[in-house]
Amino acid sequence: MKKFLLLLSIGLVFQSCWYHPDDEPMNVDPIESSFKPVTVDRETFESTIAIGAPRDIEEAGKIYVNGDMVFINELNKGFHVLDNRDPKNPKNISFIEIPLATDLAIRNNTIYVHHAVDLVAMRYNTTSIEILHRERNVFPRLNSPDGFPAEDFDLNENQIIIGYQSLN
């Protein structure tokens, strides 16, 4: 029985070595994305962070609490800042406009924001924002809705993808 299993195993191993015409690479036309990237230059992109008047929350994302302050992400638009000293009646005090912002972390009074491809460190008070540092190109570029990576598009380093437009 052992000899039979040994011969069967050897036969199965050698069967995987046989050549088959389907093993040849196929020549196919490259598939193109049905979207084109919408971009802005880096200088314009970096100047988009600002403090605005409080506004209603339309599409809330993550919620962050730091002391008496609550930060609520408005998906890809920025962060609502609420004064939560009275938890039964929080006051919406401002809106930090940061287009394409998706995440925020706070440590030692420094706010770290995922701003599209950059990581931005800043200080906030109710009337101003001070950008402490911007680490460029930390995060990957935005991929197209049909799954094509941003690297497939002919863009230079100073262009930031802010969205995609359908070609149809």
Image (tube, rainbow, N blue to C red):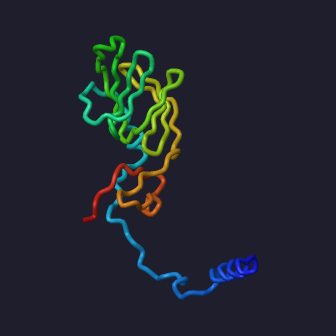
Residue at the right extreme of this rendering:
3
Taking the image as shown, residue 55 lies to the left or right of residue 32, namely: left
Image height check: is 65 above or below 158?
above
Image height check: is 160 above or below 29?
above
Image height check: is 109 above or below 153?
above
Residue at the front extreme of this rendering:
1
x, y (%) of residue 55? 25, 27
State which quadrant residue 58 falls in: top left
Q: Residue at x 30, y 13 (%)?
A: 88
Taking the image as shown, residue 147 lies to the left or right of residue 140, namely: left
x, y (%) of residue 149? 44, 59
Camera-side residue of 5 and 10: 5
Q: Residue at x 75, y 76 (%)?
A: 2
Q: How many marks?
A: 0
Taking the image as shown, residue 142 lies to the left or right of residue 52, namely: right
State which quadrant residue 154 falls in: bottom left
Camera-side residue of 51 and 44: 51
Q: Quadrant of the C terminus?
A: bottom left
x, y (%) of residue 111? 47, 28
Q: Residue at x 28, y 14 (%)?
A: 89
Image height check: is 132 above or below 142?
above
